[in-house]
Amino acid sequence: MKGIFSVLVENKDGVLSGISGLFARRGFNIDSLAVGETERKDVSSMTIVSTGDQRTVDQIEKHLNKKIDVIKVRRLEETKCVMLEMMLIKVNYSVTNRASLVELCSVMGAKILRVSPKSMVIELHAAPEVILDFIELVRSYGILEIQRTGVIAMSRD
């Protein structure tokens, strides 16, 4: 089971360390973590994705709510939220397959940021499953490097 948590926290030193320490101490895995300021400078928003059984996901929520620096914890349902991730990927290309790679980027909504004689740096903002599909589609070209931000999520309501 996937647990998606939208957590509002005080924007101060040590909060991220405290949250990640909670996961480490309890043996919970973090699949994805994204943190950023909100419209208020003193509040940050964390999107934490973790995987486990129902009991584990419930325990994560319970322990997050106990943290002093945590203002609010919301558990999001995968089917009732918008999830996005950003990826930068460096891919090999040759003269013979360059056009097909450019076409694939166009179809998938990816943006080519940098072109060198043998590789391209491509940017894609999409749902996590689209990111995974794109990675599989470009694998045959030869992936040199991947950087992913982690999921950010927001309730549709």
Image (spheres, rainbow, N blue to C red):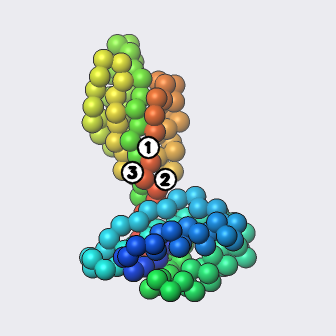
Residue located beneath label 2 in the image: 128
Is there any visible trace of residue 106 in the rendered image? no
Which quadrant holds the N terminus?
bottom right
Q: 69 and 123: which one is in front?
A: 69
Q: Of the residues under marks 2 and 1, which one precedes in the sequence?
A: 2
Between the C-alphas of marks 2 and 1, the distance is 13 Å
Name the image quarter holding residue 108: top left
Residue located beneath label 3 in the image: 86
Depth check, mark 1 against mark 3: the one in front is 1
Residue located beneath label 1 in the image: 147
Q: State the SS at label 1.
A: strand
> What amino acid is found at the position of numbered circle 3 in the picture?
Met
The answer to whether residue 131 is above or below residue 142 is: below
Q: 103 and 52: which one is in front?
A: 52
Q: At x 46% / y 29%, what residue is drawn?
A: 144
> What amino acid is found at the position of numbered circle 1 in the picture?
Gln
The answer to whether residue 36 is above or below residue 93 is: below
> What amino acid is found at the position of numbered circle 2 in the picture?
Pro
Q: Of the residues under marks 3 and 2, which one precedes in the sequence?
A: 3
Q: 77 and 120: which one is in front?
A: 120
Residue 42: give its label. none
Depth check, mark 2 against mark 1: the one in front is 1
